[in-house]
Image (cartoon, rainbow, N blue to C red):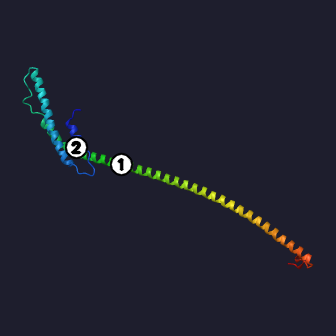
Amino acid sequence: MALSPDDVVTKQFQHVRFKEGFDPDEVDDFLDEIVVEWRKALAENEELKAKLAAYESGGAPARAAEPAPAPVAEAAPATGAAPAASAGIIELAQRLHDEHVAEGIAQRDQLISDAKSQAASIVSEAETRGREELAKLDRERTVLEGRISELRNFERDYRAQLRSYIEGKLRDLETSATTSGAQPVSALGL
């Protein structure tokens, strides 16, 4: 790739973040000096090529007395350097702004993504815990319902046994009272 003076003028250097770098104005001034010298060298090269071509064709160098177009090239960077430097600085500032905005958007998206995944994880964990607790409570309820059923059966059996025991004792009491000639207990109203 051939490098031209305009390439040097429009070259943008990336600033290093969080470190000291070169002074952009100083770099721009030095590049302007390079461009001036480069344009002189290119103009001189063109002039020499023209002289060589004229010399080789057999004619005398007719342009030897003419001044080289280098002073015109020198004036261009001097008058255009400030607007070019300003445009370069503005372009650099815009690019840095765009980079920071893009970085902020990427960071925002990453934070939102992380928060959503964390929220999904928390919700999933809570749902899992809830299901486990419900299953545990269902098991406990089943155990307690079984125990209640056992206690009801025990109570029913106990009452039936107690009733038959008491009724048996009352019959025994009535039979022993009738054999002894006394009035039965049921007749006394007890």
* Vertical side of 100 occupied by 66: above or below: above
Q: Badge 1, how many Cα within 10 Å: few under 14, some, many 20+?
A: few
Eye-nearest disc, 1 or 2: 1
Seen at 18% across and 42% down, the residue is 31
Find the residue positioned furthest to the top: 58
User: What amino acid is found at the position of numbered circle 2 in the picture?
Assistant: Ala
Quadrant of res 63: top left
Q: Badge 2, how many Cα within 10 Å: few under 14, some, many 20+?
A: some
Query: Could you tell me which secondary element the residue under label 1 belongs to?
Result: helix
Instruction: Report which residue position mark 1 lands on.
Output: 103
Quadrant housing the C terminus: bottom right
Residue 143 x/y as whole percent: 66, 59
Task: Report the number of numbered marks.
Answer: 2
Residue 16 x/y as whole percent: 26, 48
* Vertical side of 159 occupied by 4: above or below: above
Near-viewer residue (136 or 88)? 136
Quadrant housing the N terminus: top left
Seen at 89% across and 73% down, the residue is 175
Instruction: Report which residue position mark 2 lands on.
Output: 84
| Horizontal side of residue 85 vs 167, given as left or right | left
Seen at 36% across and 47% down, the residue is 102
User: What amino acid is found at the position of numbered circle 1 in the picture?
Assistant: Glu
Residue 166 x/y as whole percent: 82, 71
Seen at 45% across and 53% down, the residue is 115
Quadrant of res 170: bottom right
